[in-house]
Image (spheres, rainbow, N blue to C red):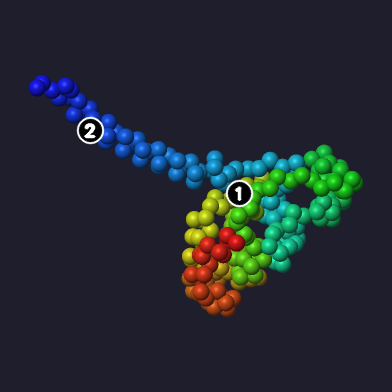
Amino acid sequence: MSQIFHRSTNALARFTIFGAVFVLAFLGWAMEMIDRGSWETRAVQVRQQPVPFSHAHHVGGLGLDCRYCHTTVETSSFANIPPTKTCMNCHSEIWNTSPTLEPVRASFRTGESIRWTRVYDLPDFVYFDHSIHVNKGIGCESCHGRVDRMPLMWQNASLQMEWCLGCHRSVQDHIRPRQFVTRMGYHPPPGVSQQEIGQRLMKEYHIQDVRTLTSCSTCHR
């Protein structure tokens, strides 16, 4: 009985099978890159705000401490958005006729809050406590980046789970003395490595069993 299919069909079938494997692998890689990319995570994307507040000017230029505006970071699970009266502490006297700051003055006159665009917005199924991180010596810069160099605010990290776990698995690389949590560009004293100071502070701040920090229930409650 003669063959139904031409002999070249075998080669075509092999090419199709191997081609499908490579196509599926490429699609998997592409989807992972999209999931990790800034288009999905919104990392390093400047967020437009009703008032173009510059952290570079206020923090880097004027030297304002983070806690002057974000007053609850040491005592609460969330970092508060400062009320308009905090802005007006200075801007009732400085640049008090600037057209750019009219939304601030209008908010102060009417009592209606400014509708700021949230930059760091975790999913509802993720629990994050600002106060425990600050009081355990994790600097603002570790998560928010060098805000003193940001004319307009952007999300500095992906906020994906692997990013959180990376820090929790190597706490000694990020911990610093509590008095320096808001300092931008912090470095250990000369002659002392980050590993040395990190290990010492972990004992001092009672962060000894690091493995518990990576359990699911730490963040997913």
Left or right of residue 210, residue 110 in this image: right
Q: Toward which corner of the image does residue 76 lie, by quadrant?
A: bottom right
Amino acid type, residue under disc 1 in the picture: Gln
Q: How many marks?
A: 2
Residue indicated by mark 2: 14
- Crowding around mark 2 (Cα neighbors within 10 Å: few <14, some 14 to 19, many 20+) is few
Q: Nearer the viewer, mark 2 or mark 1?
A: 2
Q: Position of residue 203 (x, y in %)?
A: 54, 78
State left or right for residue 69 relative to residue 171. right
Is any part of residue 98 visible from this angle? no
Q: Residue at x 51, y 65 (%)?
A: 215
Q: Which residue is mark 1?
A: 155
| SS assignment at label 2 | helix
Q: Residue at x 31, y 38 (%)?
A: 21
Q: Nearer the viewer, residue 151 or 10?
A: 10
Amino acid type for the residue under numbered disc 2: Arg
